[in-house]
Image: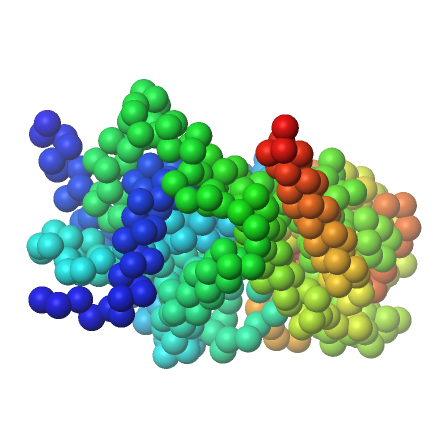
Amino acid sequence: MRGNRWLPVVLTAVGVAGIAYGLVGILGHRDATRPANLFGWFGAAGVTHDAILAPLSVAVGLATARLVPAVALPSVRVGLAFSGVLFAFTWPYVHGYGYRASNPSALPLDYSRNLLWALVVIWTAVAVRVVWRVVVARR
Amino acid sequence: MNEPFPAAVRDARDRAAQSPVHDERTAALLGIALGVAFTVCFLTGLYSHLLQHPVSWLAVPSRPVGLYRVTQGLHVISGIAAIPLLLAKLWSVYPKLFAWPPVSGPAQAIERVLLFPLVCGTVLQLFTGSANIARWYPWRFFFPTAHYWVSWIVMGALAAHLGAKVTTTRRAVRRGAAGAEGVHVVDAAPPEPGALGRRGFLAATAAASALLTVTTAGQTVPLLRRFTLFAPRRPDVGSQGVPVNRAAAEAGVVAAASDPAYRLVVDGNVPTPRSFDLAELQALRRRAATLPIACVEGWSVSARWSGIAVRDLLQMAGLAEGVHPEVEVHSLERGGLYATSTLSPAHVGEGDTLLALELNGAPLDLDHGFPLRLIAPNRPGVLQTKWVTRLVVR
């Protein structure tokens, strides 16, 4: 089909134009974008995922395969993934990096306590699911 | 060419290739969900950018009143919901990072080079966006400008990626929709004991997205307020029951705003420039309006405001009824990006565009902009200038 053959080419061209527009914008607003700093963070974002987070997840996957019985493995892995995402997302809240005493309406919650509650709920769900799987497996 | 990877990595990669979590269909489904989330983020972000950096060829409407509340709420909600989607997508395709040989031809070389801005850009955008709403700035660039320009890189890389994957995605989605062999069979019996099937993996990803959404979206969606665990704001927490973005002390206006010599000046291109002290302002005809305060950081809350319509003040300065020029609104705040804002003619002509004296039935708190603050429909919170001391008609 003609459309199918050209669509990838057109989309790639449009995409490269978008990337170029973004780069020109970054370089054209140096005072605000601080290109050296921004590109450092840009590269670090990819490296942090590919060289730290993903290998760490692989390692956790291998460790759980050894330590956790098969019947509980999927639930425990999902529980760990949820906990990891929550830890990462709530990190700046729990540490209160943005908190200022002059504006108590910003970051007003007890985020450590809330994180603890969320973890309790997640791991209770994991436990319930594992018990369920064990019961089903025994029948 | 020999593979450079150690045997353990090769084994792990080849084993992962057998799993439905890492196959074409999983990657395609997550890709579609991410494409939708990032497109929503981009369009709502672009709208927010255009409100803050108006262009002559596009008039910003003042109605619907809560439009910005919805678009910016969606911007932050879709961004947060995209975090588990992105992590799952990257996990799904991670084994391909170790493919050998890395490319099979020029077309694939272009495709893989363009993955670099895609992966770096998507991770960076979600990180900087999340950190920004938590008011955490570990970098040296100015967040709004950088976030805006990087979004073009991300959307460009996304378009190019779609171009490279459009055929694969169609095939992968059709295959599943038809219930072809190999799809549901694999789902029913994961290859390794303890491994998640595709359905389990996707369900867990959706659940993680839902968890983050439900525990944060209460900062703008009233129905979800009671589930607010991790949002940077609760819309009912703050002085006078409304959150504050920038307190008077942070803006350095405490002394100037409390000064009995305070005056509001209306000048610029008007027949009779005017100046009012606080008592005179309080004696003027009031209007009341229920308008949301909607922050770029995604929180919003509706409140009852009462004050003087900007268009009424312009008439007192001698402008004819129905004449609606552009108006600059100046704060007592010295310097800073948000010390002034510009009202478009559409906003000036709006009876609900107020210089408010009262919030929810009580005089404004200092932190909400006492003695006088701008509140107008369909407008980002950062442009609702506080501690207003001067209107300059253009």
Residue A45: where, in percent of width, then height? 42, 67
Direction front: furthest residue: A138
Viewed as shown, does residue A60 lie left or right of B235?
Answer: left
Q: Position of residue B172 (x, y in %)?
A: 29, 33
- Would residue B325 be found to the left or right of residue B374 on screen? left
On screen, residue A79 versus residue B175, left or right, reads: right
The residue furthest top is: B178
Q: Position of residue A48 (x, y in %)?
A: 43, 69
Which residue: 44% across, 30% down?
B188
Task: Using the image, determine if residue B260 lies above or below residue A120.
Answer: below
Is residue B65 visible in the rendered structure shown here? no
Front-most of A22 and A51?
A: A51
x 46%, y 64%: residue: A59
Q: Quadrant of the N terminus of chain B?
A: bottom left
**How far across and how far down the image is residue A51, in percent?**
39, 69
Which residue appears at 34% of the width and 30% of the height?
B183
Count of labels in the image: 0
| Residue drawn where x is 53% and y is 47% of the image | A70
Q: Is residue A74 visible?
A: yes
